[in-house]
Amino acid sequence: MTHGGHNWMKLLCEVILFGVKLDDEVHIVLLLVSLPSTWRPFITTQSTITSQTVDQLLSKIQLENTMRTHQHSISHP
């Protein structure tokens, strides 16, 4: 993450900690941009879905992470 990106994420965390409510669309974008660059295909696919909730995206992220962890453990015993 770039220095500017780090500052943006720090500011976002402070906004959330102070209880500022953000729309689901904003949360979704922030979740997607916070994922590692190795997740690029996942990010691209999810960014085209317009009618998902934050909870739905979080579930997909957890599933994707589980699959990636499982694939890594198979390829690196």
Image (spheres, rainbow, N blue to C red):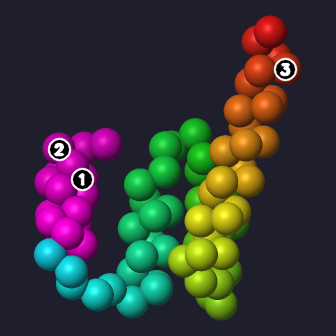
From the image, tell me which residue sits under label 1. Answer: 5
- Residue 29: image x %, image y %? 45, 72
In the image, which disc is placed on residue 74?
A: 3
In three-dimensional space, the C-alpha distance between marks 2 and 1, rounded to whole angstroms, equals 5 Å
Q: State yes or no: discs 2 and 1 in contact (Cβ < 8 Å).
A: yes
In the image, which disc is placed on residue 57?
A: none
**Position above or below: 18 against 7:** below
Query: Looking at the picture, which amino acid does disc 1 mark?
Result: Gly
From the image, tell me which residue sits under label 2. Answer: 3
Q: Quadrant of residue 77?
A: top right
Q: Residue at x 69, y 63 (%)?
A: 60
Question: Which element type, helix, strand or loop, lies under badge 3?
Answer: helix
Left or right, 10 with reference to 43: left
Q: Is residue 8 visible?
A: no
In three-dimensional space, the C-alpha distance between marks 1 and 3, rounded to whole angstroms, equals 33 Å
Q: Residue at x 65, y 90 (%)?
A: 51
Query: Looking at the picture, which amino acid does disc 2 mark?
Result: His
- Residue 22: image x %, image y %? 32, 86
Q: Nearer the viewer, residue 41 or 26?
A: 26
In three-dimensional space, the C-alpha distance between marks 3 and 2, rounded to whole angstroms, equals 35 Å
Q: Quadrant of residue 16?
A: bottom left
Q: Is residue 61 magenta?
A: no
Q: Residue at x 43, y 59 (%)?
A: 33
Q: Is residue 14 magenta?
A: yes
- Residue 74: image x %, image y %? 84, 20
- Residue 55: image x %, image y %? 59, 75
Question: Which element type, helix, strand or loop, lies under badge 1?
Answer: helix
- Which residues are the magenta region? 1-17
Q: Is residue 49 visible?
A: yes
Q: Residue at x 42, y 76 (%)?
A: 27
Disc with the residue nearer the chain's start (1 vs 3): 1
